Amino acid sequence: MLSPSDSPLGKQLRKYVCVRIIRMDNVDIALFDYDRNNTLYFFLMNADEQIYMRYGGRDARSPDSYLNLDSLALAAEKGLELHQLYKDGKLPKTVRPKPDSPRNYSMLVDRTFKQNACVECHLIGDFQNLHREKDGTLDKLVHLFRSPDIRTLGIELDVPKGLAVKETSGAALAAGMKPGDRIAKWEGDVVWTFGDLQYRYDKVPRTATSIKVTVDRAGLPVELSIALPVRWWWTDTRYRQSSIEPRSYFDDRPLTAEEKTKLGLPAAGFASQVKYVSSMAQSVQAHDLKVGDIITKVDGKDADPHADSASLYLILYKTPGDAATLEVLRDGQRITMPLKTIRMSFRK
């Protein structure tokens, strides 16, 4: 760590053995489990490989949305307290997961070990998903839409203060969460950092309709039940550069109920208006969409329980390389248009 040794954080870190892992070749990826697209991730643990907490996490806004030296210092301090409790026999041991290795994924082995190349974190996540796609176990709601955004629930954290709540709105406000609360448990699991919270939130079944959250309010625990909004699991996936996501090189927005009614479209449908078309669309001959086009159907379908836009429908139900047929409204005219999805090839 680069923190000055005489700084508060530096003094705390001197009580730790700090290890930086730069290659994942021989790491137990079941024990060190996390969203591999995080830029920075710390595990605070002991020599028995008991993990006290995680520190890290991000959202689509920025790689360091939730990274802060003050919150890291809070985590380091709490880690020392938990370690003392563990030594005193007051902190129960957790069950270690069944070990897993990057060498268990043949496509990853071909790309890295056999090429004498580095096994990087994002490669592990990507090739795990490619294996799931191949063997039929891929669940895009779980494996593509990782790390749901707590802001969808209406939770804004005071990042330097760890899990202190700064502002609430929407579902969190309706459940009774207040500014100044400190989130203490998420679905019954103790959480100390945003990294802990995001990790636990990612484990919530995508069919869930509510979650249980315990907050510390003026030193007292308060139990809350937060209703999960529709598509609470959705996150902007573009920064992930995932090989399992079918790329179609346009952005759209769901039509409002009023707009659908005016156009005679189903109220529960996923009709959406194109708001951006990438120059890549023409380069790879993906489609001929234009800004302002309204996509009303994909392969004859106009509604889906999960998708609220044509682009989300394509992501959920198409494999990269698949073709689709779009029904489009353009300047009042209905046209049919072929679309080809692309498997993105990014620097690995």
Image (cartoon, rainbow, N blue to C red):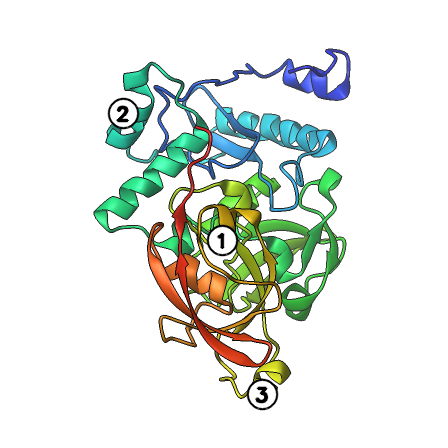
Task: Give residue 135's position: percent from left, percent from top.
Answer: 22, 46
Q: Residues within 10 Å of mark 2 (few under 14, many from 20)?
A: few
Residue type highlighted by circle 3 = Thr
Residue type highlighted by circle 1 = Gly
Label placed on residue 261: 3
Label placed on residue 188: 1
Element marked by disc 2 = helix
Q: Report, in whole angstroms, how far the alpha carbon at label 1 lies from the one at label 3.
A: 43 Å
Q: Residue furthest top?
A: 5
**For the point 37% across and 22% down, which residue is it?**
27
Query: Is any atom of residue 9 visible in this view?
Result: yes
Q: Which residue is mark 2?
A: 110
Instruction: Point out the frontmost of discs 2 and 1.
Output: 2
Task: Give residue 341's position: percent from left, percent from top.
Answer: 40, 53
Mark 2 / mark 3, whichever is N-terminal: 2
Q: In the drawing, does residue 244 fall left or right of residue 168?
A: left
Residue type highlighted by circle 2 = Asp
Q: In the drawing, does residue 241 fall left or right of residue 73?
A: left
Mark 2 / mark 1, whichever is N-terminal: 2
Q: Eyeballing the image, is 191 above or below 15?
A: below
**For the point 64% across and 13% down, which residue is it?**
14
Q: Eyeballing the image, is 105 above or below 263?
A: above
Query: Is any atom of residue 222 visible in this view?
Result: no
> In which image quadrant can residue 174 be found?
bottom right
Q: Nearer the viewer, residue 312 or 168?
A: 312
